[in-house]
């Protein structure tokens, strides 16, 4: 197991390696495997990239993000311009259901609302707007309407976990209550935990995933 100091150095190296992050303005502290990111970024997309970079590191048990988005003058946009851009970019993405998602923008912060059938549609809507110029934050309130029986959801998730090359499916327990999935057990890294959560979200009819999976190392 790596010490907090070793993990801190890994985090800083990974941030410098990530092309979407200007690591000189980001600091990292580590205590008992919990990483805290602090500092400023030029866009919400950079903040998102920094979070993603840290989460893929082994040894990270939890992540706290205290990064402030400070847009350079050239990136400032009115809420009206951001809302119009968000609607256009979602309209052109084949994974985002047309006319089912409402966008609200206030002081550069986007809120997405509506109802979709699958988690990948909800994720796609957020993914296409987070890189827009002028965006300072995204709140995804899109809901998923379950259309599949719970037992079928459970079977599909367990089968997906077994197919995943980096997961030991025998260490992960799946419970389903309506559209809610509860994962428990233990894995060796944050990446494995994320893989298990992604597998659960990919199943049709899943509206919520609660992960009680423990990261051991």
Image: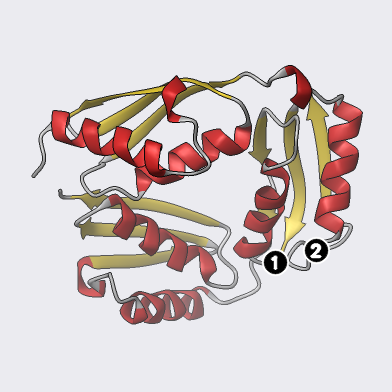
Give above or below for 103 relative to 170.
above
Residue 85: x, y in percent? 86, 42
Residue at 31%, 80% (x, y): give it: 162
Residue that numbered label 2 is attached to: 97
Q: CA distance from mark 2 to mark 1?
A: 9 Å
Q: Badge 2: how crowded within 10 Å, few (<14), some, or many (20+)? A: some
Residue at 75%, 35% (x, y): give it: 133
Whether residue 186 is visible to the viewer of this picture, yes or no, is yes
Q: Are marks 2 and 1 in contact (CB under 8 Å)?
A: yes
Give above or below for 143 relative to 12.
below
Comparing labels 2 and 1, the label whose residue is closer to the camera: 2
Query: In the rendered view of the protein, which quadrant contains the N terminus?
Result: top left
Residue 65: x, y in percent? 43, 28
- Of helix, strand and loop, which one carries label 2? loop
Q: Residue 200, located in which quarter of the rendered image?
A: bottom left
Viewer-proximal residue, 64 or 37? 37
- Of helix, strand and loop, which one carries label 1? loop
Residue that numbered label 1 is attached to: 117
């Amino acid at each position: 197991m790596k010490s907090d100091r070793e993990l801190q150095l890994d985090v800083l190296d990974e941030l410098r390696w990530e092309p979407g992050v200007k690591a000189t303005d980001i600091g990292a502290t580590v205590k008992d495997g919990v990483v805290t990111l602090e500092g400023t970024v030029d866009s919400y997309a950079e903040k998102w990239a920094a979070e993603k970079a840290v989460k893929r590191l082994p040894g990270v048990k939890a992540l706290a993000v205290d990064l402030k988005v400070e847009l350079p003058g050239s990136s400032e946009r009115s809420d009206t311009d951001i809302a119009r851009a968000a609607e256009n970019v979602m309209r052109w993405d084949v994974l985002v259901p047309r006319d089912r998602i409402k966008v609200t923008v206030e002081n550069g912060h986007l809120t997405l609302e509506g109802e979709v059938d699958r988690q990948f549609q909800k994720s796609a809507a957020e993914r296409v707007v987070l890189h827009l110029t002028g965006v300072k934050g995204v709140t995804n309130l899109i809901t998923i309407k379950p259309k599949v029986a719970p037992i079928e959801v459970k079977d599909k998730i367990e089968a997906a976990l077994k197919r995943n090359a980096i997961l030991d499916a025998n260490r992960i327990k799946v419970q389903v209550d309506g559209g809610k999935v509860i994962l428990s057990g233990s894995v060796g890294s944050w990446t494995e935990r994320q893989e298990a959560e992604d597998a659960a979200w990919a199943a049709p009819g899943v509206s919520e995933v609660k992960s009680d999976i423990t990261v051991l190392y």
